[in-house]
Every structure is written in structure tokens, then in C-alpha cells.
Image (tube, grey):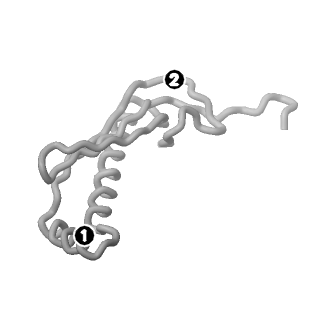
Amino acid sequence: MLVVNTETIPGYRVVELRGLVQGNTVRAKHLGRDIAAGLKNLVGGELRGYTELLTESRREAMQRMIAQAQQLGANAIVNVRFSTSAVTQGAAELYVYGTAVVVEPETAVAGEM
């Protein structure tokens, strides 16, 4: 599955539109990560617990979006975008969406190099 945040994929052409696909996940903060983040806020630096949480959330939402595209018979997703929103205090939704399409490799026109 090709997944891009552009309208086109170099070397491919869109031959069929399959529709909007999306994936999301809602995650709550972990008490251990919260304590560590609070301490890190005192001295500064990366909040690695939250970085890992967001990385896991993006991966899960992407997998759900890709699964939906596969069910529609797509082999690519274009115009992929991410969004986040607070659901409740301490929990957030990570949402990813794009357009499922069928692409095929472009073929060189005879005589072109």
C-alpha cells in the first residue's frame, strides 16, 4: 500500500477513485508517564513517554486507515492528513484520513527516454 500526503505519486497514475478512508484511536495518558512528564517539565527536555504514546497512536490509526482502503480494493492512499483533538481531560484522539485510490505505474511513451 502506497501512502502519501501529496495529490499524486511520482511514476504512477490514478486510474480509479475508491473514496475517503480514515483511521483513529483515542488514547489516555498513563499515570507513570504523567509523573515522569511532570518531573521533566521542571528541567526541560523531550517528554519521551508522550512521544512514544503519539508514535503508537499514529501507527495504530494508520493501520486502521490502510485496512479500510484494502477493503475497498485500493492499492494507494493519497492526500493523507493527521488531526488531533482532546476528547476529555487526559485523553486525546488521533485521526488520520485520506483518499483511497487504485494506481498503476506510468508507462513510457514510445520513443521517450
Q: Position of residue 110 (x, y in %)?
A: 83, 29
Q: Position of residue 4 (x, y in %)?
A: 50, 41
Q: Residue at x 12, y 66 (%)?
A: 31
Q: Residues within 10 Å of mark 1 (few under 14, many from 20)?
A: few
Q: Residue at x 29, y 44 (%)?
A: 84
- The numbered disc on residue 16 is 2
Per the image, label 1 sits on a secondary structure element best described as helix
Check disc 2 and give the amino acid type: Glu
Determine which quarter of the picture holds residue 98.
top left
Per the image, label 2 sits on a secondary structure element best described as strand
Determine which quarter of the picture holds residue 42.
bottom left
Task: Tell me the mark number nearer the camera, choosing from 1 and 2.
Answer: 1
Q: Residue at x 33, y 51 (%)?
A: 58
Determine which quarter of the picture holds residue 111.
top right
Q: From this view, report whether residue 1 is shown above or below residue 55.
A: above
Q: Nearer the viewer, residue 9 or 71?
A: 9
- The numbered disc on residue 41 is 1
Cβ atoms at labels 1 and 2 below 8 Å apart: no
Which badge, 1 or 2, comes first in the chain's sequence?
2
Q: From this view, report whether residue 24 is shown above or below residue 32.
A: above
Check disc 1 and give the amino acid type: Asn
Q: Position of residue 103 (x, y in %)?
A: 55, 32
In the rendered view, does 36 fall on the left or right side of 108? Answer: left
**Viewer can see residue 75:** no
